[in-house]
Every structure is written in C-alpha cells, then in structure tokens.
Image (cartoon, rainbow, N blue to C red):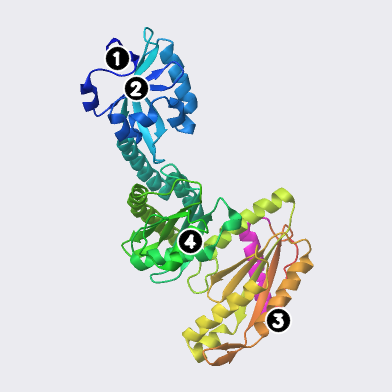
Amino acid sequence: MLSAMPNRHAPSTSFIDLLLDAVCVVDSTGHFVYVSAAFEQIFGYSPTEILGRQMLDLVHPDDRAITLQTADEIMAGQPKLHFENRYLRKDGQVVHIMWSARWSPADQFRVAVARDITARKQAESMQAALYAISEAAHLAEDLPALFQQIHQIIAALLPALNFSVSLREDQGGELAFVYHVDEQPQAQNKTDLNLFNQEILRSGHPLLLTAQTQPWLPVQLHRLLGSDGQQCWLGVPLHSHRGIIGTLVLKRYADTTPYTDKDQELLQFVSTQIAAAIERKQLIATLQRMAQHDQLTGLPNRALLHDRLHTALTRARREYGQVALLYLDLDKFKAVNDQYGHATGDLLLQAVAARLKSCVRAADTVARFGGDEFVLLLENIELAEHALDIAQKIIAALGQPMELAGVQLQIRPSIGIAFYPLHGDTPMQLLKQADASMYNAKNQGGNRVAIPPAT
C-alpha cells in the first residue's frame, strides 16, 4: 500500500476517503504525513490543518504515556489491534478511539486505522453510572456519604470539580444546600447558586448557561458568567413522583472547555436515578429516626437510650471514666391531663423536653422513657457534684411558668441519679438504681433529687 503513495505522502487510491474509519500515516518522529477524509469527521481537523503536526499533541494528557509506550512497541515490530485511547477534538471535546496499527520498516511509517468508539464508551459509562448510583443508594451510610459518592460518579462522566446538590425539605419549600464543593472556595457565592437554582425550579427543565447559549434568559442570570463572561453553569432538576425534590448543579470557571448540550443530556439522563437514590436514603433515614425517636418530643426513645448507654459504659470502662444516669418523673402530671386535656399535656411534655435539652451539653442524651418519664445520660462526669448541679438546674428550669394553649402551668420533677461504676456496671443495674431513687424522691414530696447508696 505504501508503495502506491506518490512522494511517499498520499495514497493514489481515492476509495480510502470513502471509509468511515480514518486512515492515518505517521512518520518515525510522530508527525502526521497522511490522513483520510474521515479524520476530519472524527477529530475535527481537516487534512491541511493536521499534516505535519505531532500526533501526541492531540492525545488526551492522561493517555499520552501509554500511547507513547504502544507506539514504541509498534515501531519495534509488534502490530497492535484494538488499542484504545482518548484524543481531544478541535472543539475540545474528548473522543474515544480504537486503533489498529502496524509499522512499515521499508517506508518508516506507522500506518493505523482509527475508529470512533465514543458513543459505545459513553453508553458503557452511562450503564456503569446507573449501576453505581443504585449501589450507592443501598450502601451509603447516610445522605452526606451518598452525595459524595454521587459526586465521584458524575466526575467519571464529565468535569465536576464544582458540584452542588440542593434539596427541598417539602414540596414547594425553600432549597437547602446539602452538598457543595468548589475548586475556588473564596469564590463560593450561594446567592449566585440560589439564583441559578430558582431558574431551574421556575422552568422545571435543565439549564445550560454559557456565553454562547440562552440569550433569552433574564439579564441577572448572565452576570453568573463572570466579569469575563467565560464561566459556565449546568444544572438539572431532580424529578420524582412527588415533583421536583431539588437540583444538581455543575460549574466551570474560565479557561476551561464549557459544557455542551451532550453534557446536559447526560446529566439529565442520570438525574432521575439520582433523585430515586436520594429519596430512598431519605426514606431510610426517616424510618430509622421513627424507630429510634419519640414521635411527640423528637427525643431519643427507650431503644436508642439503651444503645447509647451501652456504648457509653463500654467507653467508660476503657477510659476509666464516670457516667451519670438521671431518671426523671413529672410530679402530678396526671392532674394536668385530667384538668386541661391530653392536648395540653402533650404541649407540656414538648416544653419539658426542650427545657431538659437546654440544661445539658450537646454530647449528652435526653430521652423520653415513656409517659412522663425522662432519662438523661451524662458521659464523662468528673465529679458526682456535676451531675447534682445539672439536676438542680433542671428543677429550676422546669419550675419556671410555661404558657401553653392559653394556660399558665408549672411542673415539678422527681429525679433519681445513679453513677457508673458506683451503683452498677450494666445498663439494667443503673436504670434500676436511678428508678428506685426517683421513687424515693417522689415519696419524700417530690421536686427533689435522690441518690442510692453505693453498691
């Protein structure tokens, strides 16, 4: 074939230009000496633009090392079939190529046939992304972990250095920024992001904003392109059976290739699966919370208290620490229900829960044990007096009048305290001792604190 090339640069047979695959000839220094007509369709460069250029200049930076190694092997006499790498088109887009190439010792040329397999690669990537999103929905520990995994999955499909997820807490509600990563932290502007999100919500459609697209959009959106007009935004709504539950937004700064319509189609395609994954994780989180928290007060329930108490005791044994357990019952609570009704009694329990939480540290646990009984778990108590101080603080806080449903109420507690390791070393022993002490406080007239004798 090469012998048929006049001046050793171009084939005399025009039928090569009818091939859908591109035929390329590269000399020993890696410069193009011939390309067929299909080259322009695949790579975007005409023959006159590419002849004499270095082949490696077109190769994707991440694939240059393996491409050079493969070229050396071909020139050493090892023909290559179906070698795959990535090139950068003239328009900056990445194109996946499958090569078959051999070396001609007589002509000192590498002769190769290039097939564009970008569509196949994209389909494979899309299928892998959908599988990965579905898997993440099952394996991610919580929503933050899910958002991180989704970010990684999207980044494997298209540039995603700047990535954010915003969600509505309820239908029609305001968006909350639940995940936000920006390569230029100093440039983070939630106002701009909110403006872009609101346009997505208003239209209910994906939005691609570049200097070349959407001139009909509101003027205030165009300032998001930056002072040089070169920034680029791409966002999609997250649709579910409940409507739009949020948005997913990507951003690129100047000096980078802007997003394209194809990128928008890709992101829109995976957005439905992402929305389903988020809803599944939200449902699991809701069910877990319902299983572990009291529905009236929102406090941890008996089951979650037992779990935390077990963990606290394990840590205290390892670190030779002290744990305090406060068992609290509201004096004459039944009289409130009888006189004002259960609705007012429920309001009182909610108010008590709020005041109890205000009396302890964020790391402590306030749980509703049942009825009008509450249990407080205090970890890392250095001195018994610290727990006693908190108990007195609780008595003072609950003694302040509460205005509930037009009724002014006061409630007084009886509190029993048990300490690990002084009064027991198991959850059941400590709860039993604190409970018994609480009844001692109640039998003494209530509104007081009692501690059991050491075991």
What's drawn in magenta, residue-wise?
425-443
Rendered location of residue 219, percent (x, y): 43, 67
Rendered location of residue 414, percent (x, y): 66, 78
Identify the residue position indicated by label 1 in the image.
5
Identify the residue position indicated by label 4 in the image.
224
Label 4: element kind: helix
CB contact under 8 Å: marks 4 and 3: no
Q: Residues within 10 Å of mark 3 (few under 14, many from 20)?
A: some
Residue lying at the far top of the rendered structure: 106
Q: First in sequence: mark 2 or mark 4?
A: 2
**Residue type at mark 4?**
Leu
Main secondary-structure element of the magenta-colored stretch: helix
Q: Marks 4 and 3, how far apart in space?
A: 54 Å
Q: Nearer the viewer, mark 1 or mark 4?
A: 1
Viewer-closest of 297 and 435: 297
Rendered location of residue 39, percent (x, y): 32, 30
* Residue 274 showing in the rendered view: yes
Q: Marks 1 and 3, how far apart in space?
A: 100 Å
Above or below — where is 170 with respect to 159? below
The circle drawn on residue 381 is none
Q: Marks 2 and 4, how far apart in space?
A: 44 Å
**Residue type at mark 2?**
Tyr
The circle drawn on residue 34 is 2
Label 3: element kind: helix
